[in-house]
Image (cartoon, coloured by chain):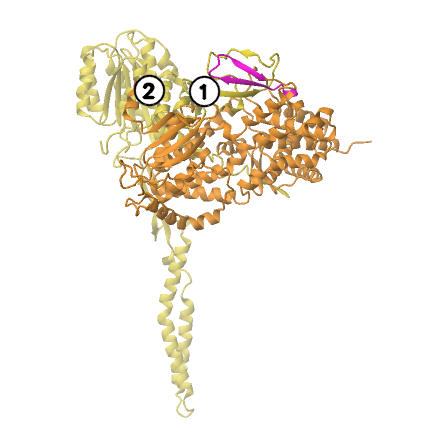
Amino acid sequence: MSYFIDRRANAKHKSAVNRQRFLDRYRTHIKRSVEEAVNRRSITDMERGEKVSIPARDISEPVFQHGAGGRRRIVAPGNKEFVEGDRLRRPGGGGGGGDGAGEGGASNQGEGVDEFAFTLSREEFLDFVFDGLELPHLERKNLVDLDEVRPVRAGVSREGVPARINIVRSMREAHARRIAMRAPIRRALREAREALEAEERKDPVLRNPARIAELKAEVERLEKRLEAVPFIDTYDLRYNHLVNQPQPSSKAVMFCVMDVSGSMTQGHKDIAKRFFLLLYLFLERNYEKVELVFVRHHTAAREVDEEEFFYSRETGGTIVSSALTLVDEIIEARYPPGQWNLYVAQASDGDNWDDDSVACRDLLVKRLMPRLQYFTYVEITPHAHQALWEEYETVAAEFPARFAMRQIVEAGDIYPVFRELFKRRMAGG
Amino acid sequence: MTRRKPIATGSDWNFEVLAEFEREIARLADEYRLDTYPNQIEVITSEQMMDAYASVGMPVGYHHWSFGKQFLAVEQAYRRGQMGLAYELVINSDPCIAYLMEENTLMMQVLVMAHACYGHNSFFKGNYLFRTWTDASSIIDYLVFARKYIAECEERHGVAAVEQLLDACHALQNYGVDRYKRPSPISAAEEARRQKEREEHLQAQVNMLWRTIPGRPSPEALGDEQDTEDPLGLHAGGRYPPEPQENLLYFIEKNAPLLAPWQREVVRIVRKLAQYFYPQRQTQVMNEGWATFWHYTLMNRLFDDGAVDEGLMLEFLQSHTAVVQQPAFDSPWFNGINPYALGFAIFTDLRRICEAPTEEDRRWFPDTAGSDWRETLEFAMRNFKDESFIQQFLSPKVIRDLKLFMLVDDDQEEMLEVAAIHDERGYRRIREALAAQYALSVREPNIQVYSADIRGDRSLTLRHVQDDRRPLARSVYPVIRHLHQLWGFPVRLESVHDDHVVRRYQWPLPDEDTERERA
């Protein structure tokens, strides 16, 4: 007897738990591979999984096995020219001979560095990239200055539009009202009827016809009143009540600000680009919607598209404040801080007109910082810092929780710097 | 004569067609008197197939990282196209569960049904090892029980603690079987009912064994031979256990001094599952050979009866040929002896010996030659395991066909020696050596519990009896470290050759050894 069962609709990923256990167990190995991958990969290339190799030795499940040595007999197929008594040199100079089924894997002991390779999915890869990191000021915008609202249910009310009538509640109210209004009438009616009956039971001689007529009229009147109690009344109606509740904004905008003056080489830009990319991926995982604004500058700032931002070359001097001013203008025009979480990431080689650095600081402290969630500055230079760095340090001192700056020398530094900038703070920090 | 109309053609399938093929195969199997469990044939997706593969054929498994590792390996191989998932996955249960992958062509589905639902299924039901060691009707329930129990342990004691325990048990699971004793059948209801009771009982037993106040020394122990180092005779009274124990996990479960009751239960679960898989490890060649022989026979009958057309048959032959391919030892694709090829060759040749014996066959198999092939094959399937099956039925013709030869690799000789080839002088020796190659006792080191020092430092001593001077691989250290975790006190392992201890291992490492290891 046989029967078929179609299981295709059943849950997949029965192994998901086991897979996760494995990843957790070899977290350190995998993290190393992921970090290397982040440093090696090109910028457009973060959105896929990664192949990870772990030395098989590290993850082997040991069992008792025979090692090499002793006397072994091996039966193998496919003899061509051997005859009994032939002597053969050991393949590979010593150690295990041919490969028999009974050999029990003795050969992968010792020095063999077999790799256990597998592929992380994109989500797993990004999880590892961002493992232990936290978005700066993830509490998002303060609720007070939020313009974004969402209607939420807030009980029932007596007023409302017919579309929101709460039928169950309305009917219940009506029922209660009917009981309440009918009770005294019913009581009076009962009394009248009893009196009428008592009167009618009397001896015909003693009956008072006027009294009987009066009671009959009374009963009739009460019965009419009882019927007149309305089944449903306007008082009974109840409406679902909605109130507007301010919502934490789920939108973020990230300003990428980069110096494209002559002193920034393509190498510098590539480093900057990765930094922006990491930040972007990071924000993308935490907000429903992330917009990017690219602002590049030399002596003058311009908003450009991504391609131009990273790949066109300019020459000339550097005035950083031009870019900050432009960012400020864009925020004014398009991104009201009440609705948007604002992030600025700036990359530069540290060059700036000396006079301008002070202007930058003023702009930041007075105009930008009060409105931003976070400002990150990376300086890509192996050289000593200049005036801009020093001015920024004073800003950092003023806004320690929301302003971060680091120096990057080469591509390999980005990931550690990024981690440091966004590392999970202690509670409340 | 016009052929009858095939049941279906082309490579698409649907449930009606599968059911019709299934009925047809069942009819033929019945004609051949194949005795099977009812079949539960499940159609699944390739992802579900990977899940099934990863849980080493347990339809319900407890959670452990090693299954995750298995899954990743399968997934990687499948993605790179190194591995076809399709062939078969069948579970020794009653009803017998077999998986069909939805991506497969019609031919594959029919083939898998013949192979798994009638080949493997009848093997599970008939072979003496499976009959003795497994209880097909209760395995699924037991797996559900095990999964639930281990999940509860994880909740109560933390995932890490359970994982460590399972790691240690897995390292020893090949030593969790009583080879010479028929086990009691496992049943989930029974397990659950008795588990509580057992926990208490077990603990009481262990307490008794390990109580620190020694019992009144027996007069014999205090007899004439007063040991100067042990005047009170605390260490007298014989070795414990009195006989060496081959079932390491059982010994741990019953005797480890420090394990908590739930830990003993987990040891037991791993042990019971090892027992369930024990027959499979010993009947690979036979099991696959039997299933392959029957899918080949049944598919040919389907074709002869006109139930399938030439196109499907050609596709089948190509697939079948790939399965029973045996690359030569010097081929880059050589990966040991292919159990499908060897098993199929032996069963096919056995049928030939019955039906058309040669003079040679009459000499080698006087009782078998010319007998009823169906009965002979049934007898072979029922009463042997790989080791004895090869010893009994590997014919000179199969040795010649596969061009088997035997090498001797002796570390005291400089060269390898070809000790036997496929000639009159070599047949018997090759047959004997190949049989030994499949004997668990040769494949796995012979390690037994030798003594537990229950009155002294509580250390546990194992003995490894060397086979042909073959030493243990380096993995011995991690394994005895796991054993030490379970036992809780020092663990020693002695390699014995010709009654002399030739090598000692122990965990924790003694200080000097640690120094030397470092140097």
Query: Where is residue A272 drawn, in percent x and y?
Result: 32, 15
Quadrant in which the N terminus of chain A is drawn: top right
Residue depicted at 30% across the width and 25% down the height: A333
Q: For the residues marked 1 and 2, what is the alpha-carbon distance in whole angstroms?
A: 54 Å
Q: Which chain is orange?
A: B
Residue depicted at 43% across the width and 33% down the height: B448
- Looking at the rendered structure, the secondary structure element under dot 1 is loop
Residue A6 seen anywhere in this rendered image of the structure: no
Residue corresponding to mark 1: A68
Which amino acid is tagged 2?
A: Phe
The quarter of the picture where residue B310 lies is top right
In the picture provided, is B446 more to the left or to the right than B155? right
Query: Where is residue A22 drawn, in percent x and y?
Result: 40, 30
- Subunit that carries the residue with mark 2: A
Q: Nearer the viewer, mark 1 or mark 2?
A: 1
Q: Which chain is yellow?
A: A
Residue corresponding to mark 2: A276
* Label 1 crowd bin: few (<14), some (14–19), many (20+), radius 10 Å: many
Outermost residue on the front side: it is B224
Outermost residue on the bottom side: it is A205
Which amino acid is tagged 1?
A: Ala
